[in-house]
Amino acid sequence: TGSKYLQARLFHDTMRTKTAVLVASTSAFAGGDIAASADLLVVQPPGTKPGDPPAAQHYDVQPSTCCYVSNVCVATSARRRGIGRKLMALALQRAAALRADQLVLHVEKDNVAAGQLYASMGFEPELLHPTMREVFTAPPFVDPAAPEQWLLSMHVTTNAGAGDLNSQQARNAPS
């Protein structure tokens, strides 16, 4: 997700506000090297601060806390093996533990494989409250010099996790 331009621009802020670094590593890939990684940070609605009670139970009524996934990368040798899906399921589980209402990410429009993965997991382009859409479509989350990107999100449930992915997909599937 995101571009090298966005990654460079967000690095400093992300390091300051990072909630988690998700890493996948197995001995099957280059002697135990990192096979995939992603960063996760909590983004509060404008005018709120960490620890504030949720503004609403429904993200479509009022802006709510989101977890933003950035810098998702899977080593070329580890692709098409389900590692990206497991990494995103872990991000979803962590977002639920942080009591976020939505999991949000950017993906370059020409990254077809990643776009298909996110769509299959239930990420959609129009789920965000307009206030949070404004947050994620402005700097530092976007860079005018970066390639065109989709802004995708999915609703997080408090019991979300790798084992709950199928029911999460069903809740996010179009009617």
Image (cartoon, rainbow, N blue to C red):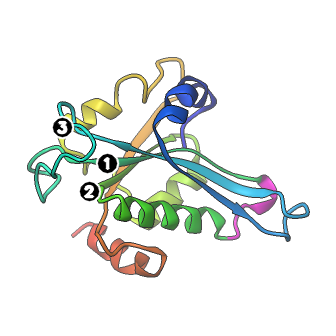
Q: Position of residue 40 (x, y in %)?
A: 48, 48
Task: Kindly identify the amino acid type of the residue bearing the numbered disc 1.
Answer: Cys
Task: Kindly identify the amino acid type of the residue bearing the numbered disc 2.
Answer: Asp
> Residue at left 70%, top 70%?
81
Mark number displayed over residue 101: 2
- Identify the mark nearer the N-term, 1 or 2: 1
> Residue at left 59%, top 25%?
5
Quarter of the rendering occupied by the N terminus = top right
Mark number displayed over residue 130: 3
Find out whether the residues at labels 3 and 1 contact each other: C-beta distance under 8 Å: no
* Between 27 and 61, the one nearer to me in the picture: 27
Question: What separation in Å lies between label 3 and label 2 (alpha carbons)?
Answer: 14 Å
User: Is 108 placed left or right of 74 in the picture?
Assistant: left
Residue extent of the magenta highlight: 76-81
Q: Position of residue 25 (x, y in %)?
A: 75, 63
Residue linked to disc 1: 66
